[in-house]
Amino acid sequence: MSIIKQHSCNLVWYRNADVFNNPMFTYRPGYETWHAYNKYSNKGGINLVDRSGCLKMPIVTTTPDCLRIPKNNKPFNLTYADCCRQRARELLDHSKNINKQIVVLYSGGIDSSTIVSAFLDVCDDTSDFERVIVAHNEMSIVENPSLYNLFKNKFEKKSSEVMNFLFDGRFIIVHGECNDQLFGSAVSVKLSGNKGYDILKQETSVDNLINLIGCEKQMTERECSLIVDRIFKPLMDSTDIDLSKLYYLLWYINFTLKWQNVYYRICAIDSYKFGLKNLYTHFSFFNTNNFQLWTLNNLHRLIDLNDSIKTYKQTAKDYIYTISKDEDYRIYKEKRGSLTHVYKGNNVIRQIFVDDSRSSESLGEDSWNDQNSFV
């Protein structure tokens, strides 16, 4: 029996490139919509896992409890800084409990700078500081020199140019994935650069959505309609969150459909041989219920739609400032892709399962749901 049949519905991550334009799936129910959305989201780079539960996905996956959207039915009063400090303390305690040091994948960007700032904030004594290793390179130093000068003599440092040995099970790996999904979308940053900031303020009407998709990715009218009618509108109709502006819809799409993909994708980079047990040694710093609840209760803090794209992740930059006191970074720092700067490898793992096993096999024909999807 193949590993695919053994695991069946326990799939948590798969490589979209194995499905995109694959004749094995082309004529299956739901493929046209799946293909259109993946064309929109960069040719299959992001596999779809709907954490909201409102869409019927063509490839059946499961969402582990640690990745589910928490219920937002109680008053929530924690600040973003509170969530940062709480998470850093939690990870330090976990480090002590399993007797492994923490390796922070650091690029100098907003996400990883938030993580390092949080550990600087909560480390109380020498034993705490000795538990944290910062993996960085020269570009990391250039991107945020003020923070580097603060931690260079406090945390152990290792080069991120050769990462294999850090993933051999001796360390807890902590990265900054999912902070984009808390605050919005890199798509928004690109849109503001290509079309101007005002597009993010537009109402989420059908016409605006179709124009947004078609103009940005040169999609056909049919493809745009499929994405809007079978993905965007059902997501909007399934929640009472105010998604009346394009920016907030783009945020919600990332929050619901992309979260699980980015959580697992670092586990699929095969430049190590030892596997990565997500329950004990793989952590997205921002994958907690409290961070998600903060977002759900503070949409107005994700970006200032009356100002500029520089306010994207402003709350995170404000927190970094409390540690680094770097006013230029707080005001002018903008989002930029940085994962490849701190971690280099070939993405050859094709599937990850809920029990942490990984497979290099492609998805089989029986992975596609036989019932109509996106309907």
Image: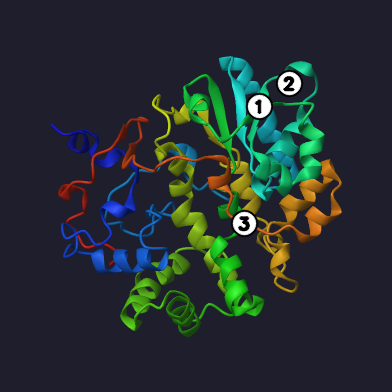
Q: Are marks 1 and 3 in contact (CB under 8 Å)?
A: no
Q: Secondary structure at mark 1?
A: strand
Left/right of residue 154 with respect to residue 356 in the rendered view: right
Residue 300: quadrant of the picture: bottom right
Return the residue at label 2: 128
Q: Is residue 339 above or below residue 173?
A: below
| Image coords of residue 297 (percent x, y) | 65, 55
What residue sits 73% from the left and 21% below the top?
128
Return the residue at label 1: 133
As shown in the figure, which amino acid type bears the numbered disc 1?
Answer: Ile
Query: In the depicted view, which residue is nearer to us: 162 or 223?
Result: 162
Q: Earlier in the sequence, mark 2 or mark 3?
A: 2
Badge 2: how crowded within 10 Å, few (<14), some, or many (20+)? some
Left/right of residue 150 with respect to residue 283 in the rendered view: right
Q: Earlier in the sequence, mark 1 or mark 3?
A: 1
As shown in the figure, which amino acid type bears the numbered disc 3?
Answer: Arg
Q: Is residue 191 above or below residue 341?
A: below
As shown in the figure, which amino acid type bears the numbered disc 2?
Answer: Asp
Left/right of residue 227 with respect to residue 254 in the rendered view: left
Q: CA distance from mark 1 to mark 2?
A: 11 Å
Return the residue at label 3: 336
